Amino acid sequence: MDKMVPIAKIHTGFPTKFGIPRQSGLVPELKGTIIFEPQFRNVDALRGLEGFSHIWLIWEFSDAVREQWSPTVRPPRLGGNTRLGVFATRSPFRPNPIGLSCVKLESIDLNSANGPLIHVSGVDLMDGTPIYDIKPYIPYTDCVPEATQGFAGSVPMHKLTVLIPHHLETKTNPQTLQALRGILSQDPRPRYQDDPDREYGFDFDGYAVKFKVPDADTLTVTDIRRRK
């Protein structure tokens, strides 16, 4: 082949970037289905993959493609106000908009009408994201227990308590509700926004979700509506 081309696209519950976890694996309940492009729908290409529990996805930040690039970016984990070198971060705004995610391999469907499908969980990708490659995760070489975390280890992980009124819980199904709790606990707001009176909103799995964060520890869902 003369150049890299996407081998597949992933289907997830995120039609836009807002709400997507900032790293893969943070919300195990988030599901995705990898659908291969027609020329790559060959079951032989997946032979042996079923023996692995996790896989690497190499993909494109398709909503972050731009002609210019900046040597420094503002990582959300540092509040969005501190600049660091782009190669010291996982920012989507890179010279080449390539992403890397480790996801759990749930199952492989070899009998789909759309060719072989790969079902995964723990995703952090927008619906329709182009996938350039799939590789198995191999613990003995990919896991480095003594690795240091740089600036990412200097800011403790903080999950919010998510409050969803009962009358809103009944508006969706249990699977979507569980995934939604995981998403919201990660605080999907931009890190530089902390207005307790502001109502935020995003779409997930066919629902329009609105919420407020009245204090540093609590997120309250204010509305859940099915998208028509």
Image (cartoon, helix red, strand yellow):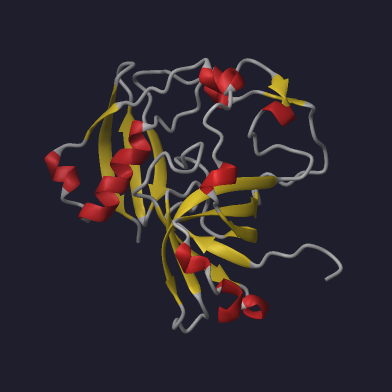
- Residue most extreme to the left: 166
Q: Which residue is more in the foreground, 207 or 148? A: 148
Image quadrant holding the C terminus, namely: bottom left
Task: Classify residue 88 by image quadrant.
Answer: top right
Residue 226 appears in view: yes
Residue positioned 35% across, 35% down in the render = 184
Task: Classify residue 199 by image quadrant.
Answer: top left
Image quadrant holding the N terminus, namely: bottom right
Give the left or right position of residue 193, taking residue 141 as reference. Answer: left
Q: Which residue is more in the foreground, 120 or 201? A: 120
Residue 133 place in picture, x, y as percent = 65, 60
Residue 149 place in picture, x, y as percent = 57, 23
Residue 193 place in picture, x, y as percent = 47, 21
Residue positioned 39% across, 32% down in the render = 186
- Residue most extreme to the front: 140
Residue positioned 79% across, 40% down in the render = 95
Task: Classify residue 37 by image quadrant.
Answer: bottom right
Note whether 226 is above or below 80 in the view shown.
below
Q: Which residue is more in the foreground, 109 or 214? A: 109
